[in-house]
Image: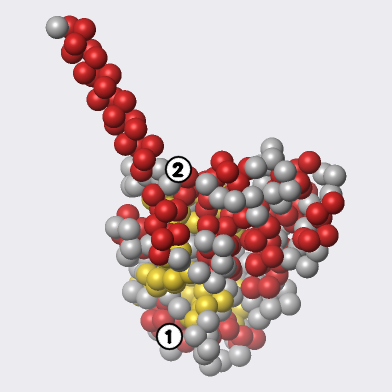
Amino acid sequence: MKRCFQTMIICVILVCFGATNLQAGNILDNVRQSGEVRCGVVDANLPGLSILDSTGKWTGFWVDMCRAIAAASVGDPEAVRYVPVTESTRAAALRGNAIDVMSANTTWILSREAGTGIRFAEPVLYDGQGFLGRADAKDKNLKSFGPARVCVRDGTTTLKNLQELAKNEYPDLIPVPFQSAKTLMEGFFLQKCDLLTADKTILATTRMVGDVAKEHFVLLPETVSKEPLALSVRDDDPQWFSIVRWSTLVMIKAEEKGITSANVDSFANSTDPEIRLLLGFEGGLGDALGLDNAWAMRIIHAVGNYGEVFDRNLGPNTPMGMERGENQLWSKGGLMYSPPVR
């Protein structure tokens, strides 16, 4: 009787384990059946990050991340359905299966991952919280400001950081929360606040979308937080997590190896073992992800390496005018680093 009971327990464990294995890969199957990746993006008017232009086309840094995932999983970088969400609804959209991946200015923090049903991939954009002021203001840094109203997005880590800053270092900073990016920017332009605080990428965008020339605004020198921005997925599908993770990492690896969208085909005869594995000329690493072996090649063809994505959307020669900084390769003093491809 005891042995029979033990056998039943083992059978239950095996059945459960088998069911878990059957669940793995479910998102990839659904993506292929539907012919599209449902990609969550915050708002629709963030130049350089995610914006729906006048022709109905989505562009921006986070949009290119979506296109890379679609190129890998569906075979077509344009096979993306962009689903606008807000900071307050993005987690529910992901957990509720309304989207397959979240690609936006979302900071990877413990409380957003542990026990939430959500898992973050490696950061693809290192940012920090800063402050935007008016160029004609006499105060040019936080220390010189007296009482100051600060426009901030409600329901974000940005607001929490500001509240901590006001509590511990700058008691004269008065948070003025807004519910959306649109009302946040309007509030600042209408001078309902003296300062605007957000990720520095958002501040760079803000200077571009107002009716006033961006030279009328100035970024204060302080950076008051670390904001590792990363894509996120549900935590119940390890195969899909690996696809999303490596769809971004291969762009970093390509830049490390000098591979670009323009020259990727010239590496067909490369003798570098890592390049041959990366581009699928040998090794069959695509099989381990449930993909074909040309998946990484398609990503590089479609969106380029990481440096190309950054420079095209955010770099010094764009209206955003951002330097690489921490987003430079590790070999050039930055934080961008890809694990080996073996």
Residue 327 rendering spot, x and y as whole percentages: 67, 58
Question: Which quadrant holds the C terminus?
Answer: top right
Please tell me whether mark 1 or mark 2 is closer to you in this view: 2
Q: Residue at x 59, y 54 (%)?
A: 247
Residue 308 rendering spot, x and y as whole percentages: 71, 66
Q: Residue at x 63, y 42 (%)?
A: 285
Residue 269 visible (yes or no) = yes
| Tag 1 secondary structure | helix
Q: Is residue 91 left or right of residue 41?
A: left
| Tag 2 secondary structure | helix
Residue 306 visible (yes or no) = no
Q: Could you say which disc has been placed on residue 186 in the image?
A: 1
Q: How is the image coloured?
A: secondary structure
Q: Residue at x 64, y 61 (%)?
A: 299
Q: Is residue 96 left or right of residue 130?
A: left
Q: In the current view of this chain or complex, which residue is farthest to the left?
A: 1
Q: Check the image and report above or below for 283 versus 198.
A: above
Q: Which residue is mark 2?
A: 238
Q: Amino acid at mark 1?
A: Glu
Residue 130 rendering spot, x and y as whole percentages: 55, 66
For this rendering, which residue is in front, 1 or 200? 1
| Residue 152, picture quadrant | bottom left
